[in-house]
Image (tube, rainbow, N blue to C red):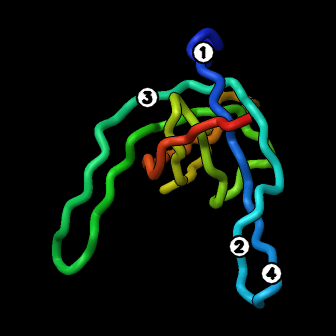
Amino acid sequence: MGIGKFNRRPIFYNETYAVDAGGGSRPVESERWEQWAKINDRSGSTSFSQSQDLTTYDYEVEVRSDGRFTSLTGMIYEGQVCKMNSMSIKSEGYKDFFILRFTKTDTWVDLS
């Protein structure tokens, strides 16, 4: 694989949960980083079959293996907040890559 195909730099983030004053939990961003990625735009859709929601994904993202990625890692790409659907490992020689599949959930607005 040519390294030139890693030509996008989305924002990835991890969240943890904190207990608020009322005893409930709320998500808190624990870390945020940018990383070079190869992103394939797919057409996400949801269908209902045999009493199950079958959700396809919007983006297939390939990144170099990094210990920060978990199954709860989110992504912000082109103004869209995305949640992870699946995560798999692809090995190429001695290098490991992650194949991540994301679905759009919200529009992200930077207010800073």
- N-term mark: 2 or 3: 2
The answer to whether residue 108 is above or below residue 54 is above
Q: CA distance from mark 2 to mark 3?
A: 32 Å
Q: Please report the residue visible at 63 percent of the width from the left and 59 percent of the height from the top.
A: 71
Residue ID for mark 3: 40
Which part of the image, by quadrant, shows the C terminus? top right
Residue under pointer 1:
7
Q: In the image, residue 45 lies at what x, y percent?
A: 26, 50
User: Mark 3: which secondary structure?
Assistant: strand
Please, what is the three-letter code of the amino acid marked with disc 4? Val
Count of picture labels: 4
Residue 26's tag is 2
Mark pair 2, 1: CA separation: 34 Å
Label 2 is placed on what type of residue?
Arg
Contact (CB < 8 A) between labels 3 and 1? Answer: no
Q: Residue flagged by tag 1: what amino acid is it?
A: Asn
Mark 1 and mark 4: Cα distance apart in space? 39 Å
Please report whichever mark, 4 or 3, sits nearer to the chain's N-terminal start.
4
* Residue at horizontal 68 percent and vertical 41 percent from the top: 12
Q: Which mark is residue 19?
A: 4
Residue 112 falls left or right of residue 2:
right
